[in-house]
Image (cartoon, grey):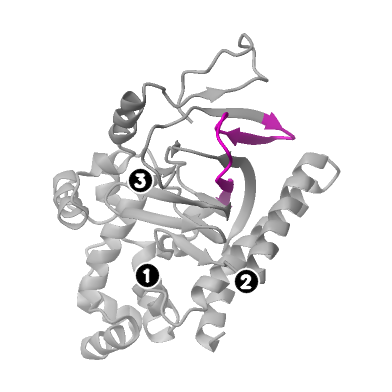
């Protein structure tokens, strides 16, 4: 691992106190779709594909195909839909609670795709601006590599500890979850080009001071002179450093970062859009809405889980996607009305 990446990890990792929630073990076949609502500030979501393939849908960001061996982390808890690669008739999803983990299946169809899903809670996230620097998704491709088995073992250990109820099990599970996330972060940062200018700039002291200052106060009316003062450099030197290490001009970086953080908060929380606009440095909700529309092709409200395509597909299928929970108080065989 490059020395600058190692230094970045040392800075980020102590700030990331993580608590795990292992939620679903899914074994699906045929057509299926599972929408996920925004989790709120401090929550991340992960999906590990152990067999078959699936598609991740997020409004404004396009589709992402995941295959066996792929591990997906959504650091900002965005609303999204995980669905079958086949857009055919959607089948109902049955749910059975086993040892605190939901087992989800599509009854009557051979299993084609297997997923392990859950959440991570970042404690003290409001005190850690570096979380905003993480990309919209981190995808680790582990097919044919021993890394997949290492991740699976860690997740099984987390689940077993939480199920045991033994003294200290929550502490041990949290340590396992922290290790899991750091391994994913290390793999992501260890690539030669993460494609994320913010992380690239954080690797170098000459630009990291400016990035951290901006992340700590996005609402400030930053000027190039302000940034140069933080960097203890001339404006020309600062521009050269940003272009060399991040491939971007400082003021362009500021505009892109504000828009990225705004999108993260809109898709990952239920906070008022006007509040988000003010806190990330936009003069008004209208100004943010125009910027979102230019970049992502949709209005801000559409980033908060547009379920219309799912409902249309359900109507065509004639069978709504339902949660069947045999352990609750419903009459045996009665299906819950809420989508998965």
Residue at 37% x, 71% y is 196
Disc ID at residue 110: none
Secondary structure of the residue carrying tag 3 is helix
Mark 1 or mark 3, earlier in chain = 1
Can residue 333 be seen in this snapshot?
yes
Mark 2 or mark 3, earlier in chain = 2
Query: Dot 2, how many residues are within 10 Å of its Cα: few (below 14), some (14-19), or many (20+)?
Result: few
Q: CA distance from mark 1 to mark 2?
A: 39 Å
Tell me, yes or no, whether the two marked residues, 2 and 3, touch with CB atoms within 8 Å: no
Residue 107 lies, with reference to residue 235, above or below; the image says: above
Q: Which residue is mark 2?
A: 145
Q: CA distance from mark 1 to mark 3?
A: 24 Å
Q: Position of residue 131 (x, y in %)?
A: 46, 61
Residue at 48% x, 79% y is 191
Front label number (1 vs 2)? 2
In the image, farthest residue toward the top: 331
Secondary structure of the residue carrying tag 1 is helix
Q: Which residue is mark 3?
A: 267
Q: Position of residue 178 (x, y in %)?
A: 65, 60
Can residue 14 be seen in this snapshot?
no
Q: Is residue 98 magenta?
A: yes
Q: Which residues are magenta?
A: 97-122
Q: Which residue is mark 1?
A: 213
Tell me, yes or no, whether the two marked residues, 1 and 3, touch with CB atoms within 8 Å: no
Q: Is residue 260 magenta?
A: no
Q: Quadrant of residue 100?
A: top right
Front label number (2 vs 3)? 2
């Amino acid at each position: 691992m490059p020395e600058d990446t190692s230094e970045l990890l040392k800075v980020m990792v102590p700030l990331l106190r993580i608590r795990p929630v292992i939620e679903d073990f899914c074994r699906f076949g045929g057509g299926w779709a599972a929408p996920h609502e925004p989790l709120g500030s401090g929550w991340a979501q992960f999906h590990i594909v152990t067999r078959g393939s699936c598609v991740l849908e997020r409004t404004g960001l396009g589709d992402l195909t995941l295959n066996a061996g792929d591990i997906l982390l959504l650091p900002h808890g965005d609303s999204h839909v995980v669905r079958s690669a086949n857009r055919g008739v959607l089948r109902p999803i049955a749910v059975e609670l086993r040892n605190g983990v939901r087992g989800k299946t599509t009854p009557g169809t051979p299993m084609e795709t297997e997923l392990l899903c859950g959440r991570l809670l970042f404690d003290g996230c409001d005190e850690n601006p570096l979380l905003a620097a993480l990309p919209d998704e981190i995808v680790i491709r582990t097919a044919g590599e021993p890394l997949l088995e290492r991740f699976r073992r860690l997740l099984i250990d987390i689940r077993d500890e939480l199920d045991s109820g033994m003294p200290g099990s929550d502490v041990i599970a949290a340590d396992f979850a922290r290790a899991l996330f750091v391994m994913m972060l290390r793999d992501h940062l260890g690539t030669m080009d993460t494609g994320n200018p913010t992380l690239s700039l954080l690797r170098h002291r000459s630009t990291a001071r400016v990035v951290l200052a901006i992340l700590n106060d996005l609402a400030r009316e930053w000027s190039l002179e302000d940034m140069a003062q933080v960097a203890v450099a001339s404006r020309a030197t600062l521009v050269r450093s940003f272009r060399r290490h991040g491939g971007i001009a400082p003021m362009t970086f500021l505009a892109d970062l504000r828009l990225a953080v705004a999108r993260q908060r809109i898709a990952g929380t239920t906070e008022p859009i006007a509040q988000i606009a003010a806190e990330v440095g936009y003069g008004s909700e209208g100004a943010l809405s125009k910027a979102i529309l230019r970049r992502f092709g949709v209005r801000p409200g559409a980033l908060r889980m547009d379920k219309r395509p799912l409902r249309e597909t359900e109507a065509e299928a004639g069978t709504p996607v339902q949660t069947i929970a045999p352990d609750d108080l419903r009459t045996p065989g009665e299906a819950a009305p809420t989508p998965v």
